[in-house]
Image: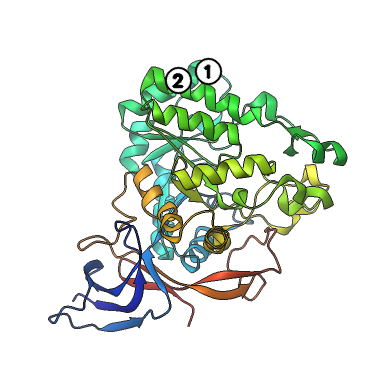
Amino acid sequence: MSRCVAIINGDIFDGRKPSLFRGNVCIQNGEIFSIGDLPDEFIADETIDAHGCVVCPGFVDLSVYLREPGQEHKATIASETKAAAKSGVTTLCCSPETVPVIDTPAVVELIKEQSILAGFSHVIPTGALTLHLEGQALSAMHALKQAGCVAVSNGTRPVRDTLIWRRALEYATTFDLLVIVRPQDPWLTAGGCIHEGPVATRLGLPAIPACAETVAVAQILALVEETGARVHFSCLSTRRAVELLRSAQEKGLTVTADVAVHQLHLLDTQAEGFDPMVHVIPPFRSQEDREGLREALTEGVVSAVCSDHQPHEEDAKLNVFSATEPGVASLETLLPLMLSLVDQGVVGLPEALARLTRGPAGILELDGGILAPGNRADICIFDPEATWKVDEQSWWSRGRNTPFWGQSLKGRVRWTLVQGKVVYSAD
């Protein structure tokens, strides 16, 4: 028996119209039945009053580390997909850097089964580009695609051999797989933990120059021209990298990019107090780089924003800055930090929501990211004015490694629905 849900009185962003509009969303049998006025023939089993809230497609996050299998001391699929539901994320791509890595259909199936058991969000495993992520032999990409991977990546692990890169792009193109690249030249990056600049010099920390990213981007773009591969650059951090991307898109290359939401806010100066919570790779960059990323976001050159969620156990951040494990637990700050960009005038609310919904869904060639009759009812309902404090009472991720701990943020998810079922409610 199908269950009918009515979401009434909300300000709707459907992913198609250029602005929000007041209306209702009716859901039947896990799919959107109608948008706008309530049909006379529709009888709701459950009604959600979204007055004062924004109703939009569930967020699609292109970079999440779930840690399971193999690193359950940091987090689990259940814990992090539950945090995703609280954050309005209904679909997420998990990194291939698990233990064992996602280079066999068996690991793909394990992750899918565990995510279904948890029941909080759709998990799309990203397959390994090379066996064991060692950058030497290509993975069985066709088998990974048949198992459910829509993309392959080597994650943060380097592929030092340019010929391997070329062969990997050619092979992925054969099976119409997206290749996700975290661009970092391994030789220029090696040993670094902070952006190369005056702050690194003052602190005496080993640095990563901006060219570590731009050299890697330029290399892959040259190979894309040669192979025609579909490539997505993950977590760009420099102005020069997005300039290269802009030129490539103007030439007609099938390349896209995202930025981690915290890179749009924090700078290398955050490391002045040697706070390990701001140890990330790629590192927080200069103000000029941040402005370049923001401009690319506004223009649509960067069509998606991700959380780059990397939960760690407490011990991972208990050491001198350079010896701590990099990464931020960031699922739950994804929406508030995007709304902060709206408040600052960097981007309008419809454009901000598009970078969390329609943009990333389009990159993965998924049906999601748009509210339309017949589409799967994956929906986020949030109060853009509600404030909450980042603390033990409000935080659901197992990873507490966030530089925003103790701060008050604006923008709170009230309900999250996956296939028409409420998987999170703030009430």
Q: Secondary structure at mark 1?
A: helix
Q: Is residue 160 above or below residue 128?
A: above
Q: Pointer 2: residues within 10 angstroms few (<14), some, or many (20+)?
A: some
- Asked if residue 426 lies left or right of residue 199, the reply is left
Residue 285 sits in quarter = top right
Q: Which residue is mark 2?
A: 223
Q: Position of residue 16 (x, y in %)?
A: 29, 56
* Badge number at residue 162: 1
Q: Is residue 416 above or below residue 262?
A: below
- Asked if residue 38 lies left or right of residue 261, the reply is left
Name the kind of residue labelled 1 in the image: Thr
Q: Position of residue 187 (x, y in %)?
A: 68, 24
Say which label, 2 or 1, has the lower sequence index: 1
> Which of 412 and 419 lies nearest the eye of the viewer?
412
Q: Secondary structure at mark 2?
A: helix
Name the kind of residue labelled 2 in the image: Leu
- Asked if residue 52 lies left or right of residue 28, the reply is right
